[in-house]
Amino acid sequence: MKRTLILTLSLLALTGLMMLINSRLAAQETGGLPEYITLHWDGRENTHLIRPGGIVELLGSKFKGVKKPDRADERSYFMNVAMNTLTTEGYELVAMTPDDYVFRRPVRR
């Protein structure tokens, strides 16, 4: 009986240790916890990013140098420009609402 109890506890401890090591390795492979950014459409002049830490970046001034093709939809065109910029920063789209696009990327710690 005592031997069975010791064996069972040893197997539980070994399983727990393996799970802990596996979760640590998975966190290292993905770069740790993700960070999120929200792209909010509020017209060409007021479209903004909400970056990690609550930093808000207005994009209207950055859109001034971009010429929209004549027959392109303004909202679709400028949201696409912003999304392509975010992908170069390592973000990927994870959720959408009519006005907000949410992106995430792994954080290297």
Image (cartoon, grey):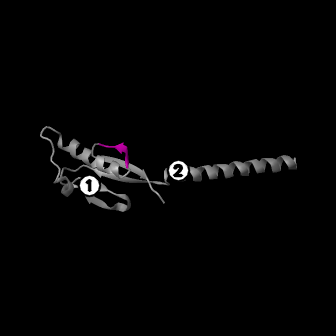
Q: What's the magenta region? A: 91-97
In this rendering, position of residue 61 left or right of residue 28: left
* Closer-to-camera residue (63/37): 63
Q: Is residue 31 magenta?
A: no
Question: Gap in Å between the C-alphas at discs 1 and 2?
Answer: 31 Å
Element at badge 1? strand
In this rendering, position of residue 94 left or right of residue 30: left
State whether residue 74 is above or below residue 61.
above
Which mark, residue 48? 1
| Residue 97 image point, x, y percent | 31, 43
Q: Dot 1, crowdedness within 10 Å: few (<14), some or many (≥20)?
A: many
**Residue positioned 63% across, 52% down in the render:** 21
Residue that label 2 marks: 29
**Residue positioned 53% across, 53% down in the render:** 28
* Closer-to-camera residue (57/64): 64
Amino acid type, callout 1:
His
| Lower sequence index among marks 1 and 2 | 2
Our reading of the magenta stretch's main secondary structure is: strand
Foreground label between 1 and 2? 2
**Residue positioned 87% across, 50% down in the render:** 2
| Residue 77 image point, x, y percent | 21, 43
Return the residue found at the far top. Answer: 71
Return the residue found at the far front. Answer: 88
Which mark, residue 61? none
**In the rendered structure, are the residues bearing label 1 and label 2 in contact, judged by CB atoms less than 8 Å apart?**
no
Q: Is residue 92 magenta?
A: yes
Amino acid type, callout 2:
Glu
Q: Dot 2, crowdedness within 10 Å: few (<14), some or many (≥20)?
A: few
Element at badge 2? helix
In this rendering, position of residue 89 left or right of residue 106: left
| Residue 71 image point, x, y percent | 13, 37
